[in-house]
Image: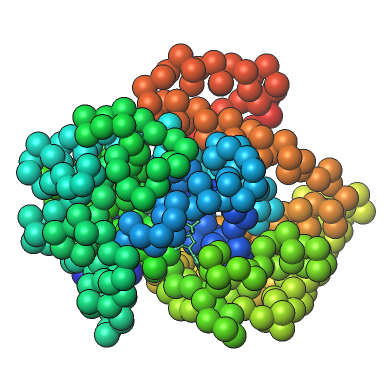
Amino acid sequence: MALTLYNTLGRKLETFRPLEQGRVGLYGCGPTVYSDAHIGNLRPYVVHDILGRTLRRRGYELLHVMNITDVGHLSGDNDEGEDKMVKSAAQRGESVLEVADLYTRAFFRDTERMNIRRPGVVCKATEHIPEMIDLIKRIEARGFSYEAGGNLYFDIAKFPRYGDLRLPGGDSRSPGGDLGLGQNRTGLDKNKRNPQDFALWFTKSKFENQALVWDSPWGRGYPGWHIECSAMSIKYLGEQFDIHAGGVDHVPIHHTNEIAQSEAATGKHPWVRYWLHNEFLVMDKGKMSKSSGGFITLQSLIDEGWEALDYRYLLLSGHYRSQLQFSREALEGARNARKALGDRVRALAAASAALEGPDAPPGGRRSPPDGLRASARVAAFDAALDEDLSTPKALAELWGLVRDKGVNPQAALRGALDMDTVLGLGLAEEAAEAMGLPMADPGFDREIEGVIAERAAAKQAGDYARADALREALKDRGVVLEDGKAGTVWRRS
Ligand code: AMP
Ligand code: ZN
């Protein structure tokens, strides 16, 4: 079976076919680093992680790019409200870059604890201002922008496909957001010809205190929020690429605007072939959001005694396109299930060790024929992921395997660990502990993965000298890199 994904562009399930055989470019919108992420914010990154791991498992070479928004994101996605970074910096009495650094580190601490693999390229908006200016120049040269009140705006009237990206059904989140429905017009930017036009570059606005400003052809100022994702994805993935992902809230404004400005600049359509959107994590009171305050962080759950992977399990138990209701009871259910799963894997590991142990006859105690049954279960697991990344079904296949009395412990263990290369629930660590094997040092592993990601970024940027230097540095530490079809893997020399 082939991987099928729900494409918001066209609103239907489609068989995934990459632009270039064997290679996939994936861009996922990253965090705005003005505060800690709440647990809802972590949902998209788990989804992107599952997608990335699934693609690698299918043998694709994956380049996964994620931005870090450290400039230009206002509290309203439609150029309204205050600048999130500036506001947070003023509240903390620190500089914007200090705040960005603090929360970027906090974000990666959270994602690492949730076994979310770091994307190959992580790029900061503030480090890509020249690329944004270049892209805006192209948009301007092709006649899609206008200057008003000192700012440069995208003119959506020039782009007939504006709003092609839409949610199914009669969702109120229309293209351009609520403004598209003629609501919420208070505080509207009077410079705009159309309320859905959006800023490409600000020089004059209500933010006289903007902390970070750059010279540009339109004056000293700073970029609108949307342009960063277009500029950075095009830089690392090309003018057309495979998959763009993010939260469902990005459909009506952020991603709609990204498409308009990217296709206006390059003249190529479609800019992105598959758009993937995850639904929200919701609480009794409605969607969890940073701005409404009172949100739950991963750290606060850990302080309550939960483990980060309990939350990962909870997320995997729902389909990414369905809203997921968060409650302590639901988390408790996930914790119990994960513990039971860990116990099963430990039991399988102990039983496998006994079969291969010193008392076993040469060649092991038996060579059972039931490995085929385990393979069939792994195939069903893969088929579940092929169905638009159905992690609930995939989890059910994992459970089916570890409970299957007709499968011998070695085959069951192998199958479970194989499935966990996608699910990322830490089952290999459970098994290693049960077998008395030395535990992999997760800190070391993460560090190596970080260097591999850095090397991928260096190669992508054409800096082969740095890429080679990073490879050599790892060699000195006894780590050998092997570049293959499914990306770079490492082993100890
Ligand atoms: P931000 O850091 O505010 O730019 O948001 C990071 C990501 O979190 C975006 O992709 C949002 O779509 C997503 N997001 C925000 N709130 C939620 C939520 N309650 N559930 C799931 N995803 C969310
Ligand atoms: Zn984005």
The number of numbered discs placed on residues in the rendered structure image is 0
Camera-nearest residue between 4 and 76: 76
Is residue 378 something one can see in this rendering?
no
User: Is residue 244 shown to the viewer in this render?
Assistant: yes
**What is the quadrant of the C terminus in the image?**
top right
Q: Quadrant of residue 461?
A: top left
Residue 359 at what x, y percent from top left? 92, 54
User: Image height check: is 387 above or below 365?
Assistant: below
x, y percentage for residue 198? 24, 55
Relative to residue 444, is residue 35 drawn left or right? left
Q: Residue at x 31, y 81 (%)?
A: 171
Q: Nearer the viewer, residue 475 or 117?
A: 117
Q: Would residue 2 be found to the left or right of residue 389 on screen?
A: left
Q: Quadrant of residue 288?
A: bottom right
Q: Quadrant of the N terminus?
A: bottom left
From this view, report whether residue 369 is shown above or below residue 479. below
Determine whether, in the image, residue 477 is placed left or right of residue 372.
Answer: right
Which residue extends farthest right? 359
Give residue 458's position: percent from left, percent from top: 45, 25
Relative to 161, say whether 395 is above or below.
below
Q: What's the residue at 65%, 26% (across, down)?
A: 479
In the foreground, 94 or 255? 94
Residue drawn at x 31%, y 75% is: 184
Q: Residue at x 70, y 76 (%)?
A: 331
